[in-house]
Image (cartoon, helix red, strand yellow):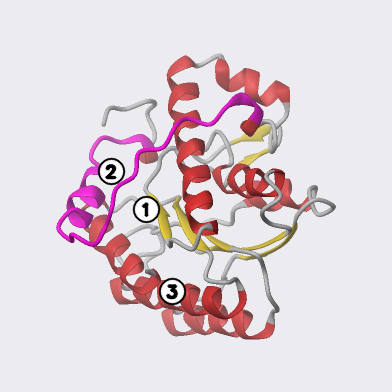
């Protein structure tokens, strides 16, 4: 998987350990998506933003494929199949008319708004457990509340136990949604930039999402890869999450 630009999310060797780890387990199926269309991107972004990304053909190509992977994951989740989108570039720092933080198109917003356009969902809960707050998701979905009612949690607790408790408490206190999606960043890992969460914590987060979705989202759940830069353990952390999540 070659580089499309020179940032940590685009580094060679980032997706390979994930795929290698998941392929060890026969109950994990790999699905190849189609790229998103320009119309899909325009559900969340302005025409000016789309054109700016088009000006870099390689980035445009891979960003469309990433957004297409997000849409495929969302559509499978709506059918009741728990799905993890092993995609790059990430997307949660892409706003309607701007982007930063290694992101280009907002994969979560595009995928949720696609389900909404298809008249499948009217509400969604977003759990963003990346180290960095997904400002793009917040900015885009805030402006779409007339179409899609959303709630977003970016946990801020400073210890692993408090972090997990914060998620659990939020899940207990809120009502039902049509679907739940995670902006699944693994850079809070103890050996990554955040230095906070263990491998087992990701399994617990996955289980919290599974239980919440089955109780309040008709079992509909998916997650999309965002951050995570300690490549040596990225595969095992994602596998741990998926084991709790499935």
* Highlighted range, magenta: 10-39
Q: Image quadrant of residue 58?
A: top left
Other residues around mark 1 within 10 Å, as few (<14) / some (14–19) / many (≥20) = many
Of helix, strand and loop, which one carries label 2? loop
Q: Is residue 173 visible?
A: yes
Query: Any mark on residue 14, and which?
Result: 2
Instruction: Say which label, 2 or 1, has the lower sequence index.
Output: 2
Q: Is 30 colored magenta in this rendering? A: yes
Q: How far apart are the two marked residues, 3 and 1, measured between alpha carbons?
A: 16 Å
**Dot 2, how many residues are within 10 Å of its Cα: few (below 14), some (14-19), or many (20+)?**
many
Q: Are marks 3 and 1 in contact (CB under 8 Å)?
A: no
- Secondary structure mostly seen in magenta is loop
User: Which x, y percent locates residue 42?
Assistant: 69, 31
Q: Disc 1 marks which residue?
A: 228
The correct choice, above or below, for 206 with respect to 92 in the image is below
Position of 20 compared to 106: left or right?
left
Q: In the picture, which quadrant includes the N terminus?
A: top left
Q: Which residue is disc 3 drawn over?
A: 205
Relative vertical location of residue 43 with respect to residue 137 in this rendering, above or below? above
Proximity of marks 2 and 1: CB atoms separated by less than 8 Å: yes
Which residue shows up at 75% across the image and 54% down it? 148
Q: Position of residue 173 (x, y in %)?
A: 68, 84
Picture layout, residue 190 above or below residue 138 = below
x, y (%) of residue 99?
A: 61, 35
Q: Is residue 196 magenta?
A: no
């Amino acid at each position: 998987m070659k580089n499309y630009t020179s940032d940590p999310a685009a580094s060679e060797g980032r997706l390979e350990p994930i795929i290698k780890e998941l392929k060890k387990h026969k109950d994990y199926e790999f699905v190849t998506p189609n790229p998103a269309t320009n119309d899909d991107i325009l559900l969340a972004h302005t025409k000016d933003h789309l054109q700016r990304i088009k000006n870099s053909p390689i980035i445009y190509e891979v960003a469309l494929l990433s957004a297409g992977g997000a849409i495929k994951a969302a559509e499978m989740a709506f059918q009741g199949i728990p799905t993890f989108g092993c995609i790059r570039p990430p997307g949660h720092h892409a706003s309607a008319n701007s982007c930063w933080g290694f992101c280009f198109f907002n994969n979560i917003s595009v995928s949720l708004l696609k389900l909404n356009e298809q008249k499948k969902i009217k509400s969604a809960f977003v759990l963003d457990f990346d180290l960095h707050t997904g400002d793009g998701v917040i900015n885009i979905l805030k402006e779409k509340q007339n179409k899609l009612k959303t709630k977003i949690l970016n946990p801020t607790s400073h210890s692993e136990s408090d972090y997990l408790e914060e998620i659990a408490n939020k899940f207990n206190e809120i009502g039902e949604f049509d679907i739940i999606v995670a902006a699944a960043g693994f850079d809070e890992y103890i050996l990554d930039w955040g230095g906070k969460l263990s491998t087992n914590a990701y399994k617990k987060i996955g289980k919290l999402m599974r239980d919440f979705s089955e109780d309040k989202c008709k079992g509909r759940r998916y997650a999309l890869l965002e951050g995570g830069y300690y490549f040596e353990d990225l595969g095992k952390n994602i596998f741990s999450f998926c084991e709790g999540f499935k």
